[in-house]
Image (tube, rainbow, N blue to C red):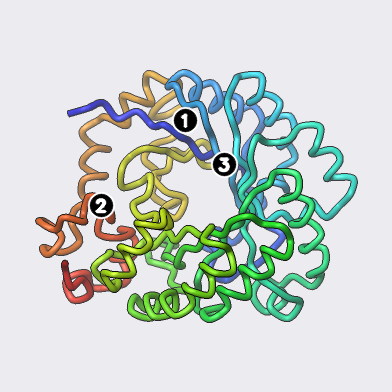
Amino acid sequence: MALVKPRVAWVTTNRSCNLRCPWCYTKGENFDAGKTLSFDLALKILSIIRQIGVKHLLVIGGEPTLWKHLFEFNRECREAGIKTTLVTNALRFANDEFWFRYLQSPNDKVGPSIKAFDAPSAQRLAQLPDFESARKALTRLVAKFNCGVTFVHNSFARNDLVSLARFAKSCGANRVGISPCTPSLSDGKPEITGMVPLQVIVSDVVSQYQELHDLMDGKLTLALKIPLCLWPRDFIEKLKERGQLHSSCQFQNRSGIAFGPQGELLACNSMAEFPIGKFGEDFDDGESLISLLNSERVTRSYDHINSHPSEKCVHCPQVGFCGGGCPLMWTVYDAQASIPGW
């Protein structure tokens, strides 16, 4: 068996946020401002990342622009030769002082995630009273980094995908990425706020797809997160031909790992309650981290969670690409009843 060595890492800086989106995985931790990554621990994690050969990390939260060490951490990463992508709701970039300070120590890339498309939706979806600040922030960010944006299809904005894309394009975004709301685990149970039934996800996305495709001149990515056999086959083939389809994730192919704000090693931020290990207890350098990731205990855990959700997946020619959907979906839905197979 090939040695598992992550190619990318997530560093989770905090669990606090300046929004209150009801579908967010951080909600399960009550947006806890006390769960914040210390700078000392951040540097130790950075050292481990270098030791295992990872060249790219994503800085995520919570909301990482609220992390007081962001600028100095960015500088340390740059000096270490590590490329970084900031995953952010972008709101703080509306503040001129913060923006100009950030420009002195920027990330290599940014991945803005938008929540709303006008003032009423901002208040309704994210408890954001100042939508024009969000517009200003996103406009200046995409102008600087020439980037696209992502947003989540959820039960609060089922039919708003085109409106979200139109707002993003008006701010200069050159691409949009869409993914369905998935559960996170909170108090040992799946948190389902914002989730949409599987067949409704399909009908919502398919019905809005052509307008999205035309609006964005084809610069569109769909992270489906549910089995491909639930979608019309011609729709999937069209997405593949156009390079618009993204399916299995780093958890399923074991290509990445996440570090929590208290040194937890996480397979996925949506499973923060169930860490694989912890810095200082289960690993303290690159060698011990790789040993942990390849241990029998961790390998069995991954294999169990990533096992075929349905017997119909076992011999399906598409399972290597779709992975049977996000494993967390099957904490909510009955895979045997939901998956038709191809």
**Residue type highlighted by circle 2:** Ile
Separation of residues labelled 1 and 3 (CA atoms): 11 Å
Name which quarter of the figure residue 190 lies in. bottom left
Mark 2 or mark 1, whichever is nearer to me: 2
Q: Residue 148: x, y in percent?
A: 61, 53
Q: Residue at x 47, y 50 (%)?
A: 269
Q: In this picture, is 149 found above or below 341?
A: above
What SS does tag 1 mark? Answer: loop
Which of marks 1 and 2 precedes in the sequence?
1
Q: Nearer the viewer, residue 145 or 98?
A: 145
Residue 32 seen anywhere in this rendered image of the structure = no
- Quadrant hosting residue 105: top right
Labelled disc at residue 305: 2
Kindly identify which residue carries mark 1: 279
Report which residue position mark 3 lands on.
261
Most foreground residue, 231 or 281: 231
Q: Which of 80/165 is in front?
A: 165
Which residue appears at 71% of the width and 26% of the height?
75
* Residue type at tag 3: Pro
